[in-house]
Image: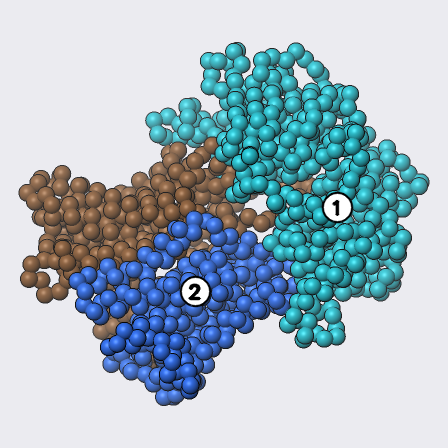
Chain colours: A brown, B cyan, C blue
Amino acid sequence: MSPPVNPPERKLQQNPSRSLTYRLMHQSKTALRAAYPPMLAVLAALLVGAMLMLVAGASPIAAYSALFRQALTTYFGFADTLAKTTPLLLASLGVLVALRAGQFNLGAEGQLYMGGLGSLLVGLALPGWPVWIHLPLALLGGFGFGAAWGAIAGYLKVARGLNEVLTTLLLNYVAQYLISYFVNGPLKAENAPSPFSELVAVSARLPTILPKTQAHAGIFLGLAIAILLTVAFAITPWGYRVDAVGQNPIAARYAGISTNRTILSVMAISGGLAGLAGSSEVLGLKRRLFENFSPGYGFDALAIALLSRGNPAAVILTSFFFGAIRSGASVMQRNASVPVSIIYAIQGLIVLFVAISLTLDTQSRVSLFSAKSTKEQQT
Amino acid sequence: MGGDLRLTAITKRFGAIAANDNINLTVREGSIHGLLGENGAGKSTLMNILSGLYQPDSGEISLAGEQIQIESPADAIRHGIGMIHQHFMLVKQLTVVENIILGQSKQSGLNKAASRLRLNLKEQSDAIAQLGKTYGLEVPPMALVSTLPVGIQQRVEILKVLCRQARILILDEPTAVLSPTEIQSFLTVLKQLAARNHTIIFISHKLDEIMDVCSEVTILRRGQVVASVPTNRTNRAELAQLMVDRAVEINTQSSPQPVGDVVLDIRDLWVNAEHRQVAALRGLSLQIRAGEIFGIAGVDGNGQRELADAIAHLLPIQKGTIEIISPASTKTKPKSVAYIPEDRQKQGLILSFSIARNLVLKAFSKLPFCRRWILDNKKITAHAKQAIDAFDIRASSPLLKAGQLSGGNQQKIILARELAGEPALIIAMQPTRGLDIGATAAVQQSLRSQRAKGAAILYISTELEDVMAMSDRLGVIYRGQLVDVLDPNAATLERIGLLMAGQSSSSSPQNYPSETLQESANEPAGKPA
Amino acid sequence: MTPIDFISDFLSACLRLSVPLAFAALGGLISERSGVLNIGLEGMILTGAFAGAATAIALDQVWPAVGVALVAGAMVGLLHAYLCVSLGVNQLVSGLAINLTAAGLTTYGARLLFETGTVALPAIAPLNIPGFQQLPIVGVFFQQDPLFYLLLLLLPLTTYALFHTHWGLSLRAVGNAPRAADTAGVSVSRVRYCSVIFCGGLCGLAGAYLTLVHVGFFTENMSAGKGFIALAALIFGRWHPVATTLACLLFGTTEALQLRIQAYGLDIPYQLLAMLPYLTALAALAGLAGKATPPAALGIPYTKEKQ
């Protein structure tokens, strides 16, 4: 059922003089179009959030201004925003890498917990080592544990044909209980009143970057990885391979690319990056391992990756936005008496509206999620 | 119901393309009306409008002088229009009877509630068996559709529309999937149906069949009606010319040339169908030498796909060997296998990637496109520009997405990629399917020039004329085995047709008796005994 | 406690823990049989649980609360159907969005309504069936609440409907080959809408069961992955109602077992026990090893005109 005469390109050939302007217009249009729907989605979610506040009898203007003023314009608030942006950024990059290969890693939360455990173990194990060895090793430990956790889902997918969505979700619960077990049992600090571990060695800590605040150097790690990934997707064969598998795994396989190996490695890297988010919490923020130390960063990460349309650079901004919301929420609760939990609703709504916005722009739907939705086309 | 069917000024656009442009057509009651046209002429679109799948942008449809609206397939059924699609609209996971009664609860006015709550499969299957007998369309009602051969599946499709009291049957390329013997019995059924005053619209691009069964034929070209003539006042040559707007020359002569050493050596190959424990290839052996095109003819689904995939290492081998031997002259280079897959959009290309990136899908991680872990985008683009010139890919820029090109140009991208670096062996799976005549010629020319350079080529096609025209030697595949290897210049169409149906020329023709229908499903799993 | 009491007690716990899973899994089964992937079961359960709890507090009556939970779940189903069927949103993303939004909204709502923390709710009383409830061991089947009996009724009904009615035939056809169903005169979108809304309603009941029968109050994220386990159960049950319900019973039993072991104070850290249901679900899926074939059109939006 192919159309009889095709094609945009024939038209272009007939009008060579128009082709350049046409292309330029086309490109700027697509760039605009790519940025426009996510913005709209965020606005819509904030609007619905405002209505929810009205229902509760609070003033949305007061609430939002309290939230953003705290998060962006005060010293401690801004530092807190950075501190919250850090794990979000790292975990989102993890989810994004998987998304580029067509995999939905919903296990960032669990991988984050495992990464925290890995970093803690290394952080406790080698006291007295120089920082420049100990800190990288501790980070590597987090990456490794997260990667292993992600690789389980990857393995189940390629070897047993299990959809990664469900396995990663289930593994989240396992990881969370596992951490809970460790900090209540073998890793519990001596005489600790509640479940938490000993402090990691000083040499394994990520340094604070704004004095007297919780903002720590983990943010630089996140930024560096975001830049690295941008470059990797643009000009390395690895990025090419991941995109090829994400866009059309069948064609990739026919061209000799091992889709299984790619999926497995991508799930491991994805888990590793989410694991680094846990590392940054343990080595930079809390300096020890707590029970349930993540307030759902792994799930936010999915929202961020979707909102960023698979673009690592966009993840930086989006994570910052989500970090700011989280950072300003408590002040919002105090000043405008809106429960903090409204932000969870808003985040959910953002994903909802992003999902809708994806359908407004078929271009990006195809590029992000093509593998499945085109399956039945020409039957 | 019944009466003449009239389409007036039907137009349907997809984006900027008019798939149907101001179409007028009258089909007389009780006649078999041929609809002729090349791929993409707009036949399927027009019929999808008639069957309610698409809505026309403008134009009117009338039946027995009364204007009708067909807004859904259910509407079409209500008006007595039944469509048999080229790709069968059967739910393979369900049984024959379930497929036939699907969606029919609304039609049975009496006992409406009761019939919705009870399927009553036994009674229904008896009725279907009875109906099948009346029309010469015997089917096993309780069998799962996925276990039936395509010829029987087609009968189910026809019974499905007959059960809905369809008076007008639209058949979209119904013979494309059938073997020559199946085609004969199928055409007989059509004539019987017409004799019972059913109106039939028969879509085809095969001139013989149109001339054989139709009383009138309408020719479509690029979405427009170019002529509508009674078949007894025209001939094949005229129809062909109307269809393609230029004299057709059927190029059958291959230029035989000295062949070299064996490049592909397959011995006793057993391969399972993908994700299934059913043997699709059952002890197939063949050799192809450098500089020859070995054609494989056969009805779709007899192991062609598995053969190609197994050679390309995409399917595991259960038993036997596949050996690819690089000819001495190219020993210095690593042996390479080119694979032109069956479905260019799903298997051959990444539609969202640019032409340039598609062209390096196989070589992107090697020199010169990748140096020290970095892709050289300049080299990739330059390479694309060369390929665009060399293979006459009609595109204004190598950065256009592959999905924006026409089918012929997409196929040329695949050819450019696969034939780069003079492969020792080329597997071409239905490489001209769905292409217009110009693109078909370009594809065939590229392959012939590769043969001249000493490549061994495995050419698989279900279009008999196509594969006969291309091959130096022709193997016929049936149920996972090569039943014979022939000289295409000496063999007759009839003989090949019989072989494709699984009969050596000596045995008598047979239909599928319903007792043996499930044979393919009951075959021993996977491994040979 | 006599051994018989112990067994009855344990069996009763198994049933109680399996019921919400089974409601959700049956709903998910219908949705997925129609070709709509539904990872949003979790959010639908949570919505039902919250709506049920809120209504029960407001009216101090249980049955209207059950009704409201059903409707609330169905409304979420309607949303999912609208997104997936009418808009063609990626079904995974839609389901996730529903989970996240439901979690956020119910937590927010709980903060507003139940400011004092957890509020005890009126509970649905068990409905004892005279004559049978005294029987040893099997008696527990006859001293359950009405929702349990509803589930028992629902199971043969769905099984029959799925395989022996035109409605079920349309459902199976739409989930496997929507285009074929469409050309046969079945409205794909209507079947999918109905299925997903039905699914939402059942999940709402699962939620109501959690708050009004099992736990007795609402806490944030109280569904605790039940929706995901229900999904695992329906895959493990190969999209068949009876097998799926049995799988739910297996996972429910695992949960009951770990609670029992905890209660008996054996020297096993509870966290290791608490992860058992999830591990069982994972192991069940891994053991299945791709042998279960999902409906062929699962997760693929259907659009009529596609070139």
Amino acid type assigned to the residue bearing label 1 in the image = Pro
Of B342 and A299, the residue lying toward us: B342
Q: Whole-percent x and y of residue B364?
A: 44, 30
Q: Whole-percent x and y of residue B509?
A: 79, 37
Asked if residue B403 is positioned above or below residue A173 in the image, the reply reads: above
Q: Is label 1 in a helix, a strand or a loop?
A: loop
Residue C66, visible in the rendered structure: no
Residue A132 lies in quadrant: top left
Quarter occupied by the N terminus of chain B: bottom right
Q: Whole-percent x and y of residue C160?
A: 57, 69
Residue B487, visible in the rendered structure: yes
**How far apart are the alpha carbons under marks 1 and 2?**
42 Å
Amino acid type assigned to the residue bearing label 2 in the image = Leu
Crowd around label 2: few <14 · some 14–19 · many ≥20 (10 Å)? some
Q: Whole-percent x and y of residue A158?
A: 41, 43
Left or right relative to B504: residue B337: left
**In the image, what residue occupies the spot 43% across and 48% down?**
C289
Crowd around label 1: few <14 · some 14–19 · many ≥20 (10 Å)? few
Asked if residue A315 is positioned above or below residue B272 in the image, the reply reads: below
Q: Chain of mark 1?
A: B
Q: Which mark is residue C246?
A: 2
Residue receiving disc 1:
B513
